[in-house]
Amino acid sequence: MPASVIGALGSAFVLLLLIWVIGNFSQDPSEFLNVFLIGLTNGAVYGLIALGYTLVYGILQLINFAHGDVFALGGLVASTMILSVFDLTTTSGAGIVIVAVAATLAVAMLFSSMLNTAIELVAYRRLRNAPRLAPLITAVGMSFILQNVGLIGWGVNFTSVPRLIPNSVAFSLGSVDFQWNKLAVLLLTFPVLLGLTYLVRATRQGKAMRATSQDPEAAAMMGVNVNRTISFTFMLAGGLAGAAGVLYLLNFTTIRYDQGFQLGLIAFTAAVLGGIGNLTGALVGALTIGLIEAFNEGLTWYTPGSDWTRSIVFSLLIAILVFRPEGLLGERTPEGQ
């Protein structure tokens, strides 16, 4: 198909999308903004998981399909901390809740970091020079193993925790209410994202990660410890998954052993949508999917309804990859040209 036709189709799609968004906004601006905030909050959680995918892919060109299950186990460990260690309830004092949530976040991130590092050491390290199909199959197998660990440890039913962060109004902008539970997710998420960006772009370890991503052999010749750098990357990705598990649990109050598969698939889609291997692209893709979900399920003007949410998300992914195979913010490579 000629490039001019593809460009025209893409422009028409964007125009129709803008008309739909503006139409819904004009119907009820305050409801539109409330739904927008829900999508922004969900997208922030997806973004933490998507960053783990894109970090690992950026350095090893490996899709770690077990990453979503690391997220789920991190959330389940957090539920044990909340219910069994701190015995928190909805009547617990604010000071106790803050200390307990901070400790739970630290424990979940430490657990997930160690778990993800162990996965790299046991399942992936010896397969670095193997055909790409081998580590891919290993990743799928590790995903099933972690799901069964969660099933044995926490059972088949959902694990529920009390709503520790109230969904009462934190502040209002005009007729738009911003609730505490959504504000807490954003206050915890965006500093993590900024810190990660700084680490990768401005620190010595970040430079080692980028050098290893571009050429492991050359990086080793320049004195970079490649094994340690890759282990650090998996540790960092695991910590992000653990933080996402805690935030998801605090926001939705329930989690189960197999939720990592669904959330991991969404986050992986977000990473591909934004341009896998690109940190900013992973966040943009995650926020895009969060907003699509919220708009489709919360708006009323010419909206297909919640049953179509997944179809819309993956249709958009296919359309973007057709028009821009490298993703929204990904860089075109010689292999993709």
Image: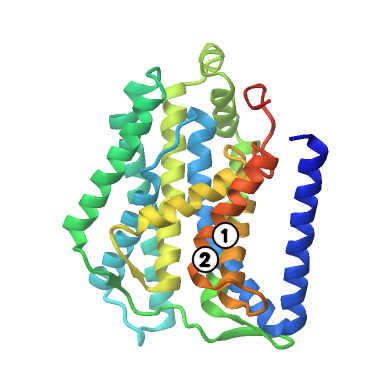
Q: Nearer the viewer, residue 295 or 173?
A: 295
Residue 189 appears left or right of 255: right
**Residue found 66% across the figure and 83% down from its top:** 31
88 lies left or right of 243 = left
Image coordinates for residue 32, horizontal then vertical, percent: 68, 78
- Pointer 1 and pointer 2: residues touching (CB < 8 Å)? yes
Residue 212 can be seen in this image: yes
How far is disc 1 from disc 2 in space, using C-alphas?
A: 6 Å
Q: Which residue is mark 1?
A: 312
Q: Residue at x 75, y 49 (%)?
A: 10
Look at the picture and state if 148 lies above or below 203.
below
Residue 303 found in image quarter: bottom right
Query: Tag 2: residue type?
Result: Trp
Q: Is residue 119 above or below residue 219?
A: below
Is residue 107 visible in the rendered image? The answer is no
Quadrant where the image shows the N terminus: top right
Measuring 37% from the left and 53% from the top, which residue is drawn there?
A: 261
Judging from the image, the colouring scheme is rainbow
Residue at label 2? 308
